[in-house]
Image: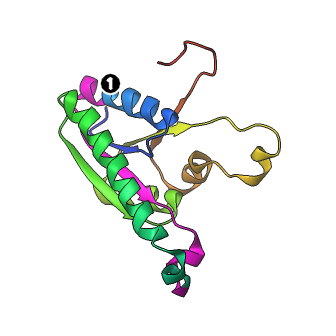
Amino acid sequence: MYETILLAYDGSRESRLALKEGAEIAERFGARTHLLAVVNLPTALLGGEALAAGGGMAREIERCKTVLDEGLERLRARGLETVGHLERGDPPETIERLAREIHADLIVLGYHRRKGFDKWWHTPTCALLIDLIPTSILVAIQDETPGANP
């Protein structure tokens, strides 16, 4: 059913849950896995202001490399051969582009429920992806109940 799975990973507990669920699906179907970490820098840093940022771009790239390596280690510990991708850009656009390039038939994302005003200021990546690509998306949701989703 699934041959190529793209897992978007940022090191958060929600994305660790998505990594676990995506790995279980990959194991079950013998799917190829690709792990993506996206360096999402503010638009201002991509222009001339990057020099004034005091190395903020380099620190963010290094943080994302560390996150990617951690995710790859988790997947490989389960016996999955995984290709890692470190990309710069807007997460939904980057996920969509890579999913098309690798012909992913499943994208796995973590999701954190937002409350109050936070809902009004953020558009979930998964909602944007649903409109962009013709492939299945698994959204792993962290249960906030104490002791749930270890």
Residue furthest out toward the top: 147
Residue 58 on image: x %, y % = 40, 68
Residue furthest out toward the front: 54
Q: Is residue 147 left or right of residue 114?
A: left
**Residue visible at 57% across and 37% down in the picture:** 111
The residue identified by callout 1 is 24
Tell me which colouring the rendered structure shows. rainbow
Q: Is residue 44 above or below residue 75?
A: below
**Residue visible at 57% across and 69% down in the picture:** 42
Look at label 1 and name its amino acid: Glu
Res 99 visible: no
For residue 149: magenta? no
Quadrant in the picture for the N terminus = top left
Q: Which residues are magenta?
A: 26-48
In which quadrant of the rendered view does residue 73 lie?
A: top left
Residue 48 on image: x %, y % = 52, 87
**Residue visible at 31% across and 52% down in the picture:** 103
